[in-house]
Image (cartoon, grey):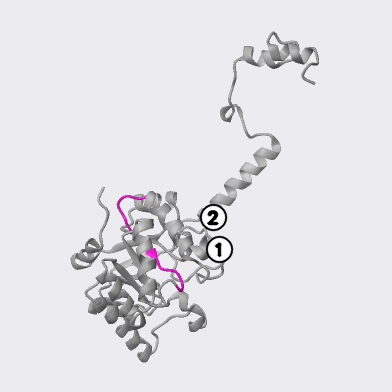
Amino acid sequence: MTRVSTTDVRQMKQRGEKIVMMTAYDCPTGRLVEQGGADVILVGDTLGMVVLGYDSTLPVTMEDMIHHTKAVVRGTGHALVVGDMPFMSYQTGWQDAMRNAARFIQEAGCGAVKLEGGVRSAETVQKLVEAGIPVMGHIGLTPQSVNQFGGFKVQGKTPAAAVQLMHDAQALEQAGAFSIVLETIPAPLAELLTQRLSVPTIGIGAGAGCDGQVQVFHDMLGMFEAFVPKHAGRYAEIGEAIRDAVRRYAQDVRSGAFPTEKQSFRMDPAALAELRPGGAGTIGRRHALGLDA
């Protein structure tokens, strides 16, 4: 099976085909997401919140990301797997970014990396691309800068902010990014950027005018309930289904209804008789004589 390449993703924009991207953080989830039809799987640093229990993405480490990305790669064979560069794995200079991005490619086996920032990250993106590492950009609401933004707020609402986002997008395009995530920006601005850029845009909270969309697995399936982002599309309530299944299991264990004969294993009655007091076998005789007391 041939994996989707970054060239394939760019050609999808040219053909007017929408790009489907979702997050995954482990082997079975990656397999399910791929089987469901995702073109691109992002192993996002959102795992800090939806898997590891942090209140932001900031505590996530490279070791966390490599560990989870390896699992997703093992569970997939067709989708393009993108590893998300965690906080401070690239902000300290392109040399550090190169070392950490190389780990995603060499150790984890993914096909590209994603990093946040526009103009400020352009040099790093260019260096990685020149070294043969495909890069997905990310502008708008960049969660690793949440403290600077003062929370998870819509970006690009004023003319000046919108112009800055245009500069950011163009800088990433010129640096060689093969696609750009647009997060939580006004839909008309996202559509304008999509029209002006030659590389695909992937929206999350950026309207339907983008070349593709990305959703967080746990948001889409109702498995993360600390808060529900406005941009999240709920397609199932798996969280409630899991709770209900565990409740029924707990009830059955406490009542003795589980396990049944169906979940139990049998043994030869003759072999069982050997173990009983007075049985014909050695164990039975030793027990009968009190020698094993």
Residue at left 47%, top 80%? 153
Q: Which mark is residue 225?
A: 1
Q: Report which quarter residue 103 is drawn in.
A: bottom left
Vertical side of 15 occupied by 138: above or below: below
Q: Report which quarter residue 123 is drawn in.
A: bottom left
Check disc 1 and give the amino acid type. Answer: Glu
Question: Is residue 115 in sight in this rendering?
Answer: no
Check disc 2 and give the amino acid type. Answer: Gly
The verdict on residue 82 being magenta is yes
Do the residues bearing badges 1 and 2 touch, measured as CB atoms within 8 Å? Answer: yes
N-term-proximal mark, 1 vs 2: 1
| Front-most of residues 89 and 221 | 89
Please identify the quadrant where the C terminus is shown: top right
Q: Residues within 10 Å of mark 2 (few under 14, many from 20)?
A: some
The verdict on residue 183 being magenta is no
Q: Which residues are magenta?
A: 76-88
Vertical side of 273 occupied by 94: above or below: below
- Describe the element under mark 1 as helix, strand or loop: loop
Q: Which residue is mark 2?
A: 239
Residue at left 78%, top 16%? 291
Vertical side of 149 occupied by 110: above or below: above
Residue at left 56%, top 28%? 262
- Describe the element under mark 2 as helix, strand or loop: helix
Residue sitting at the far bottom: 160
Q: Report which quarter residue 127 is drawn in.
A: bottom left
Q: CA distance from mark 1 to mark 2?
A: 9 Å
Residue at left 25%, top 63%? 6
